[in-house]
Amino acid sequence: MTVAPEAPGARQAPRRPRTTLPGPPLSADPGGERRRALSSLRDTDVYAMVGAAAAALSLTWLLFGWLLPFNGMVGFVVMAYGFFLLLYALLVSFDEDGPAVVDRIAAAVVRSMGILLVAILAIVVVYALVEGRKALVHLNFFTQDMELAGPLEPLSVGGALHAAAGTLIMIVIALVITVPLGLICAVFLNEVPGPFARFVRTIVEAMTALPSIVAGLFIYATAILGLGLDQSGFAASLALSVMMLPIIIRAADVVIRLVPGTLREASYAMGTSRWRTAWHVVLPTCRSGLTTSVILGTARGIGETSPVLLTAGFTSELNLDPLHGPMVSLPLATFEFVKSPEPTMVSRGFGTASLLMALVLLLFVAARIVGGRGPGQLTRRQEHRRVLASKRDARRFAARAGRAAPPTAARAAASRDADPIDVKGSADVRTSTDVRASADVRTSAAAKSSADVRASADVRTSAAAKSSADVKPSAAAKSSADVKPSAAAKSSADVKPSAAAKPSVPPAPFRPQPGSSS
């Protein structure tokens, strides 16, 4: 039986792949295991969460209302949250394995804690706004002080203008003191390491936990009792500075540590000094982080009450002089208002607290706008100044290059600016000099050519003499052949090196002696 060969265009059977993937073979049916991204959210995850929450609430209500003698909102929330975690883990275990269940439970705990913090903040803000709404609707609350308003006066009289002005004055003075000192100290701790820097860092970390009443007593004992200052806004600013300074230093220190060391090395490689590197490289790179540190320090100082009470006192009048007379802040005014049993004063107290939160929010937004730009992002005014500085640098470099130009270019520029007659005379001199030099060159070249011609003639003459001497050798001819050609060769050798300087006299032709045979 003969098998016919397969046609060239016939389809061949698929070959088995040579690469084998590790693990079990992948099945094409929908029931097989498929890869799933952990960050994706499936419908079963939503159903499990909603079902666990509903079951936890129902079970807790059943226990609190019918089976157990429990009551109270806090206990209800805690028990419902515990049941939610247990039921959610049970529902997730139907679709996932052990590590996935642990991941879902951890994610639920973290997210619930975040929701709890946001809820607490929202409750505080909303409660203050709701309780102070009666005072906030009156315009006089923002434009008047409490000089003419008593505890029994209606809300249409009096306001919190004196407390808001005092808070702004105190916090501005405290920021003027603490921001430069805090940033300088943070730069020192990072750029000048050593034993003293470690000692300062330890003191700063210890002062972050300093009680506010201790800071107030320190300023009261040193500034008011020791130096004789009055209870004023300036003394309160000093107390707030003691509270804010460790916070700003510690936060700025952490932020400056995050600046890459390669930026400093590049600055030092360009010949920049240490302080210019810190000012132009380190601080602009971490500007947004430094703004955050200032915000944290401001939040610590603007809400203090006891240092202000010890150092600034209390007043119901508007005082814009920070050096003389008592001054009040918004936290202290809130504390004094809510102590009163009158509902109108309590409403003023919550209205003052709402005004404090709005003021803090305004300061935070302003700080974020000022320092929220990233590294290298400049405003239009800064870009304009940068362009002008670049133009000045370019002009300075051009002037420096002109001063360092070669002498020939300088002489050419001077000759262009000189008198035309002088220029013509100098050109004639240069022309005549060039003509003489070229004539000398041509003369030396001609002399050298003639010297070479004569030398070659001498060589041919000596070669002919030597041939005639070899035909009929004799002692005298041999002697004369040895002497004459060597003399001619010596003469030609002497002529060649000096031919460029002065033409040599050609040697006499060879003549045989009378006693020799030709």
Image: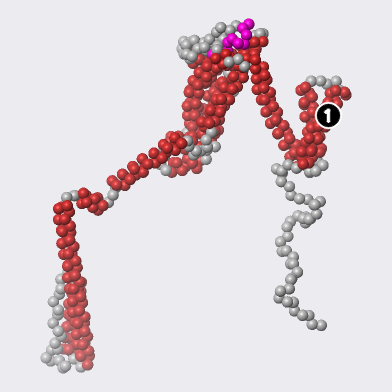
Q: Position of residue 215 (x, y in %)?
A: 55, 17
The stretch of residues the image draws in magenta is 152-162
Q: Is mark 1 on a helix, strand or loop?
A: helix
**Observer-nearest of 484 and 447:** 447
Q: Where is residue 199 in the image (x, y as percent from the top left)?
A: 52, 28
Answer with left or right where residue 425 lies relative to residue 239.
left
Q: Which residue is drawn at 60% across and 22% down?
A: 357
The C terminus: image quadrant: bottom left
Please say whether residue 70 is visible from this viewpoint. yes
**Observer-nearest of 168 and 452:** 168
Kindly identify which residue carries mark 1: 58
Q: Where is residue 318 in the image (x, y as percent from the top left)?
A: 52, 12
Q: Which residue is drawn at 43% across and 43% down?
A: 269
Q: Residue at x 54, y 37 (%)?
A: 258
- Report how many numbered discs are placed on residues in the image: 1
Colouring scheme applied when the structure was drawn: secondary structure
Q: Residue 275 is drawn in which quadrant? A: top left
> Compared to 114, does 266 lie above or below?
below
Mark 1 Cα shell of 10 Å, populated few (<14), some (14-19), many (≥20): few
The N terminus: image quadrant: bottom right
Q: Is the magenta stretch mostly helix, strand or loop?
A: loop
Q: Give the amino acid type for the residue marked by disc 1 in the picture.
A: Ser
**Observer-nearest of 452 and 104:** 104
Answer with left or right where residue 269 lies relative to residue 203.
left
Q: Where is residue 197 in the image (x, y as percent from the top left)?
A: 50, 30
Q: Residue 88 is drawn in which quadrant? A: top right
Q: Is residue 492 magenta?
A: no
Please say whether residue 351 is visible from this viewpoint. no
Q: Return the residue found at the far left.
A: 514
